[in-house]
Image (cartoon, rainbow, N blue to C red):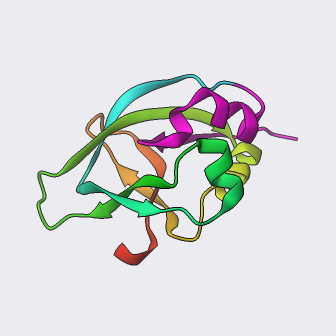
Amino acid sequence: MINTTEALFSYGTLQNAPVQLETFGRELEGFADVLLGYQLEMVEIEDAQVVLLSGKTHHPIAVLSVDKSAEIKGAVFKITQQELARSDKYEVDAYQRVLGQFKSGKKAWVYVSAKAL
Protein backbone atom coordinates (compact mmCIF):
# COMPACT_ATOMS: atom_id res chain seq x y z
CA MET A 1 0.00 0.00 0.00
CA ILE A 2 1.31 3.46 -0.93
CA ASN A 3 1.42 5.86 1.99
CA THR A 4 0.77 9.26 0.43
CA THR A 5 1.97 12.34 2.31
CA GLU A 6 -0.38 15.26 2.79
CA ALA A 7 0.37 18.81 3.90
CA LEU A 8 -1.78 20.27 6.68
CA PHE A 9 -1.60 23.90 7.84
CA SER A 10 -2.41 24.69 11.46
CA TYR A 11 -2.87 28.09 13.07
CA GLY A 12 -4.43 26.78 16.29
CA THR A 13 -4.70 23.80 18.59
CA LEU A 14 -3.27 21.25 16.13
CA GLN A 15 0.10 22.91 16.82
CA ASN A 16 -0.08 21.76 20.47
CA ALA A 17 1.92 18.63 21.34
CA PRO A 18 -0.82 17.05 23.55
CA VAL A 19 -3.39 17.49 20.76
CA GLN A 20 -0.97 16.01 18.20
CA LEU A 21 -0.17 13.03 20.43
CA GLU A 22 -3.85 12.27 21.04
CA THR A 23 -4.95 12.89 17.43
CA PHE A 24 -1.99 11.41 15.51
CA GLY A 25 -0.10 9.33 18.07
CA ARG A 26 3.04 11.39 17.51
CA GLU A 27 4.38 14.93 17.50
CA LEU A 28 4.37 16.43 14.02
CA GLU A 29 7.27 18.10 12.25
CA GLY A 30 6.63 21.09 10.06
CA PHE A 31 7.68 24.52 8.89
CA ALA A 32 6.33 28.03 9.36
CA ASP A 33 4.14 29.47 6.62
CA VAL A 34 1.41 32.08 6.17
CA LEU A 35 -2.15 31.47 4.92
CA LEU A 36 -3.26 34.17 2.49
CA GLY A 37 -6.71 35.80 2.25
CA TYR A 38 -8.02 34.83 5.71
CA GLN A 39 -8.29 36.49 9.11
CA LEU A 40 -8.70 34.93 12.56
CA GLU A 41 -11.84 35.00 14.66
CA MET A 42 -12.83 32.86 17.64
CA VAL A 43 -15.46 30.12 17.72
CA GLU A 44 -17.02 28.51 20.80
CA ILE A 45 -16.36 24.77 20.95
CA GLU A 46 -19.28 22.74 22.30
CA ASP A 47 -17.74 19.27 21.80
CA ALA A 48 -16.68 18.21 25.32
CA GLN A 49 -13.96 15.84 24.02
CA VAL A 50 -12.32 18.60 21.97
CA VAL A 51 -12.51 21.04 24.91
CA LEU A 52 -10.99 18.42 27.22
CA LEU A 53 -8.16 17.69 24.80
CA SER A 54 -7.35 21.30 23.90
CA GLY A 55 -8.12 22.77 27.32
CA LYS A 56 -9.97 25.63 25.64
CA THR A 57 -13.66 26.45 25.11
CA HIS A 58 -12.89 28.84 22.25
CA HIS A 59 -10.61 28.10 19.31
CA PRO A 60 -9.29 30.35 16.55
CA ILE A 61 -11.02 29.96 13.19
CA ALA A 62 -9.92 31.22 9.79
CA VAL A 63 -12.56 33.33 8.07
CA LEU A 64 -12.33 34.42 4.44
CA SER A 65 -11.42 38.11 4.41
CA VAL A 66 -12.49 40.89 2.05
CA ASP A 67 -9.04 42.36 2.75
CA LYS A 68 -6.87 40.55 0.21
CA SER A 69 -3.75 41.40 2.26
CA ALA A 70 -5.09 39.45 5.26
CA GLU A 71 -2.89 36.59 6.42
CA ILE A 72 -2.59 34.06 9.22
CA LYS A 73 0.71 32.72 10.57
CA GLY A 74 1.01 29.05 11.40
CA ALA A 75 2.79 25.83 10.50
CA VAL A 76 2.54 23.27 7.70
CA PHE A 77 2.88 19.66 8.83
CA LYS A 78 3.54 16.57 6.72
CA ILE A 79 1.03 13.88 7.62
CA THR A 80 -0.37 10.69 6.10
CA GLN A 81 -3.82 10.34 4.55
CA GLN A 82 -4.85 8.30 7.59
CA GLU A 83 -3.71 11.13 9.88
CA LEU A 84 -5.62 13.63 7.75
CA ALA A 85 -8.77 11.55 8.33
CA ARG A 86 -8.05 11.66 12.09
CA SER A 87 -7.71 15.45 11.99
CA ASP A 88 -11.09 15.62 10.21
CA LYS A 89 -12.62 13.81 13.20
CA TYR A 90 -10.92 16.19 15.66
CA GLU A 91 -12.28 19.34 14.03
CA VAL A 92 -15.85 20.30 14.92
CA ASP A 93 -18.60 21.12 12.39
CA ALA A 94 -17.76 24.85 12.46
CA TYR A 95 -14.66 24.00 10.39
CA GLN A 96 -14.33 22.80 6.83
CA ARG A 97 -11.12 21.52 5.21
CA VAL A 98 -10.05 23.35 2.04
CA LEU A 99 -6.87 23.63 -0.01
CA GLY A 100 -5.26 26.94 0.98
CA GLN A 101 -2.83 29.29 -0.71
CA PHE A 102 0.31 30.23 1.18
CA LYS A 103 3.04 32.83 1.13
CA SER A 104 5.58 30.08 0.35
CA GLY A 105 3.70 29.24 -2.86
CA LYS A 106 3.02 25.74 -1.57
CA LYS A 107 -0.44 24.19 -1.22
CA ALA A 108 -1.76 22.59 1.97
CA TRP A 109 -5.02 21.59 3.57
CA VAL A 110 -6.38 24.03 6.14
CA TYR A 111 -9.49 24.11 8.32
CA VAL A 112 -11.48 27.29 7.80
CA SER A 113 -14.93 28.49 8.79
CA ALA A 114 -17.65 26.38 7.18
CA LYS A 115 -19.75 29.57 7.05
CA ALA A 116 -17.23 31.33 4.80
CA LEU A 117 -17.85 29.02 1.84
Q: Nearer the viewer, residue 74 or 4?
A: 74
Q: Is residue 6 magenta?
A: yes
Q: In this orientation, does residue 89 appear?
A: no
Report the residue at 26% width, 56% height from top: 38
In the image, farthest residue toward the right? 1
Picture coordinates of residue 34, whole percent (x, y): 29, 38
Q: In this orientation, does residue 62 appear?
A: yes
Total marks in image = 0
Residue interval drawn in magenta? 1-26
Residue 9 located left or right of residue 4: left
Query: Is 88 situated above or below 5?
Result: below
Picture coordinates of residue 54, whole percent (x, y): 59, 43
Residue 76 located left or right of residue 3: left
The C terminus appears in which quarter of the rendering? bottom left
Report the residue at 54% width, 62% height from top: 45
Can you tell which quarter of the image residue 42 is in? Answer: bottom left
Picture coordinates of residue 64, whole percent (x, y): 28, 65
Picture coordinates of residue 31, whole percent (x, y): 43, 24
Report the residue at 47% width, 41% height from top: 10
Q: Nearer the viewer, residue 109 or 57?
A: 57
Q: Nearer the viewer, residue 116 or 47?
A: 47
Query: Is 92 situated above or below 90?
Result: below
Report the residue at 64% width, 37% height from top: 19
